Image: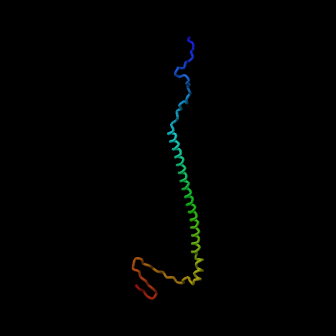
Amino acid sequence: MTAARPLRQPASRQGLRVLRGRQAKLRPALAPWMIMVLIGVAAFLGLGFARTSLDKSAFELDRLNRAITEQEAMNEQLRLEIARMENPARIAPLAEELGLVIPQDTRQLLVDLGGPALVSNDEGARQ
């Protein structure tokens, strides 16, 4: 067997020493991750915008439903007022105060819409 000899340094490299350098790390590609992050952010903002639009439409629909309900209530009140104002029991005393009376005799007028118009009065007929 041969004896182990110490390693010699070459004459030209005396006084030099070897420094351990950093190991080259493989960095993952940044572009695919950035694209995925941008897609995620765009999707998040898109969903937020869609949700806001739907909520805005829901608020508008609610406002319109409330307005319809108020108008239906007002319509019902006006119908009741019309019925009250058209009541003959209310109109008859007001008419009597104005001097109007219920006629005792009635006449029927027959109108022929197919022929020429004739006008008549009690004194005589005129054409």
Give x and y (percent) for residue 5. 56, 15
Quarter of the rendering containing residue 87: bottom right
Front in this rendered view, residue 101 or 7: 7
**Which quadrant does the N terminus fall into?**
top right
| Residue occupying the far top of the picture | 1
Q: Residue at x 43, y 83 (%)?
A: 119
Give x and y (percent) for residue 103. 54, 83
* Colour logic: rainbow
Front in this rendered view, residue 14 or 116: 14
Front in this rendered view, residue 1 or 102: 1
Q: Residue at x 56, y 23 (%)?
A: 15
| Residue occupying the far bottom of the picture | 123
**Which quadrant does the C terminus fall into?**
bottom left
Give x and y (percent) for residue 2. 56, 12
Looking at the picture, does residue 99 appear above or below residue 41?
below
Looking at the picture, does residue 43 appear above or below residue 102?
above
Give x and y (percent) for residue 41. 53, 45
Total of numbered circles in the picture? 0
Q: Residue at x 55, y 82 (%)?
A: 102
Looking at the picture, does residue 94 appear above or below residue 1?
below
Q: Residue at x 46, y 87 (%)?
A: 122
